[in-house]
Image: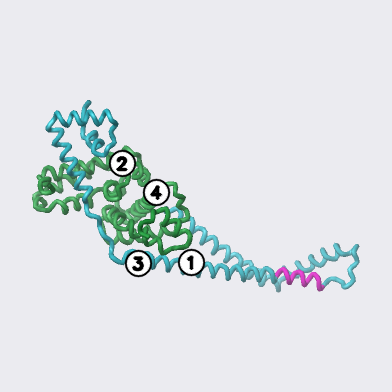
Amino acid sequence: MNINNEMLNNYLDGDLNFNEVDEVKKALGSSSELKKEFDDLNRAHNILSKQKVCQTKNDFTNLVMQKISKKSKSENEQKIFLITILSILCIITVGIIGFILYQIVSTMPSTIDSTNTISSLSKNLNNFFSDLFSKNRLTLLGSILSFVMLISAYFLFELQKHSRKNLMI
Amino acid sequence: MKNLTDVEIIESVKKGNAADYAILIDRYKNNAFSMLKHMLKNDFDAEEVLMDCFLKAFNNLNTFKFESKFSTWFYKIIYNTALTKLANQKRKIENEMFSVDDLNYLESKYMADELVKDNISNVVKKVIEELPEKNAAVVTMFYLEEMKCEEISEVLKISLSNVKVMLHRSRNLLKEIIGKRNLFEEVL
């Protein structure tokens, strides 16, 4: 078997099988040149094993932990911000629904005839929506829609940021 | 506390004991810093990237599923972040198989007469610091972190044979440099 440099390296790393180890041992015993090459390689291996570990600054761990605690604080603040925005959105939605229901109920006659209930309700709804989309109310509706779009854009941005972070790993 | 395994520490951190993460930082910071320093060739960048890596690892600890060792997962983060940093610096990133010329250049450089009187630890330090990024990463993970070649290939996303080639060439380079300069006696 031809014992080359790669085999010596594998022998050093313990990557050879039993037969190969035997062959290498025999070759090392019979060839002084090969023995010298192996000894040099072994010394290089020992030097690399004993290389000094580079030290970080003494306060490195504290600095990382401080950053982590700062980050979790800002994340909590972000959560509170999101909850506040969502609550406001919910209140606005509940308000709008309540307003619609109030408008419908207030325009209905006090004595409800069961046969006319459905037609009366649809008529009222029709009146309400045509009133809602009238020139006067359109500004209010536009503002609400813009607000909802802004909130959606914010969530989209946060989602993208989060996915980008995950992709980095 | 310091005798806890990586898995136990991670589970504790996941339960909300963020302070336990400091044990993991202490455990890995110096070896990881050595690898980054060898790859980035710069103390300041190495420390900045290392801090970034520890923060990334903390933020993504929930995605760590214990399928591999924490060290393998963490060194993947380190290696990828270092490559991103190098790309940002518009430095050359090697292909999977590095150029032999790089090592030949180093060999001729460290045979130079002015370096003959330099001591062995300085020569080793200089040689490792000037190795191409991937070789430096392989040498550090193998010798300092005592990772197996299989784990290194997982971190670097290259084949096992390529890891071995890189390791053997780096070792041969050092052998040639030191051997020709008769520095082995100094070591012994």
Q: For the residue marked with disc 3, what is the amino acid?
A: Asn
Query: In the rendered structure, are the residues bearing label 1 and label 3 in contact, judged by CB atoms less than 8 Å apart?
Result: no
Residue B46, above or below A23? below
Query: In the rendered structure, are the residues bearing label 2 and label 3 in contact, judged by CB atoms less than 8 Å apart?
Result: no
The residue located at (23%, 29%) in the rendering is A22
Residue highlighted by disc 1:
A75
| Crowding at mark 1 (Cα within 10 Å: few <14, some 14-19, many 20+) | few
- Residue A98 inside the magenta-drawn segment: yes
Residue highlighted by disc 3:
A62
Which element carries disc 4, helix, strand or loop?
A: loop
Which element carries disc 3, helix, strand or loop?
A: helix
Q: Which chain contains the residue that carries disc 2?
A: B
- What separation in Å lies between label 4 and label 1 (alpha carbons)? 28 Å
Identify the magenta region. Answer: A96-106
Residue highlighted by disc 4:
B69
- Residue A144, given in percent of the width and then of the height, sits at 64, 69
Residue highlighted by disc 2:
B163
**Foreground tag (4 vs 1):** 4
Q: Colour of chain B?
A: green
